Amino acid sequence: MAATKETMLDSSGKAMDGQIYLREDMLENMVSALDVYGHEVTHIAFPELDDNTSDFYSKIGQVMATITKVVVQEKIRVPPSVVW
């Protein structure tokens, strides 16, 4: 996957020649989306924990690690790296 400064007027990203090209501003949005997703899934998994506590942040790490483990176990193909 490559982040590009080139303007893509017609889209946020394109798949070409086996590569995924994203506008750089899309990376910021994806990081925000993953952050919020991890946070909210942690609330579902551990409803007894309050925001902004060390226990809650520890559990976010556990939840995201579990998601990663499933991706690896199920052999879900993810892009190997991001080119900045």
Image (tube, rainbow, N blue to C red):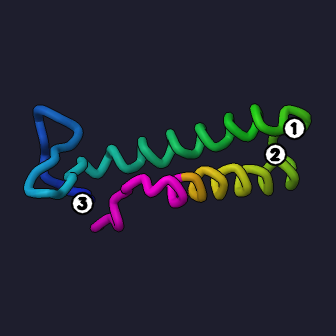
Residue range highlighted in magenta: 71-84
Circle 2 residue:
52
> Which comes sooner in the sequence, label 1 or label 3?
3
Q: Is residue 66 left or right of residue 17?
A: right
Quadrant housing residue 79: bottom left
Element carrying mark 2: loop
User: 65 and 55: which one is in front?
Assistant: 65
Residue picked out by circle 1: 50
Labels 2, 3: front one: 3
Q: Measured from the top left, where is residue 14 in percent x and y?
A: 16, 44
Q: Label 2 neighbourhood size at 10 Å, few (<14), some (14-19), many (20+)?
A: few
Query: Extreme right residue here?
Result: 48
The amino acid beneath tag 1 is: Asp
Q: Which mark is residue 2?
A: 3
81 in magenta: yes
Magenta stretch: includes residue 46: no
Q: Indicate the quadrant containing the C terminus: top left, top right, bottom left or bottom right.
A: bottom left
The correct choice, above or below, for 65 with respect to 80 in the image is above
**Residues tagged 1 and 2 counted as in contact (Cβ below 8 A):** yes
**Marks 1 and 3, how far apart in space?**
37 Å
Distance from Cα at disc 2 to Cα at disc 3 = 33 Å
Residue in view at x 65 percent, y 58 percent: 65
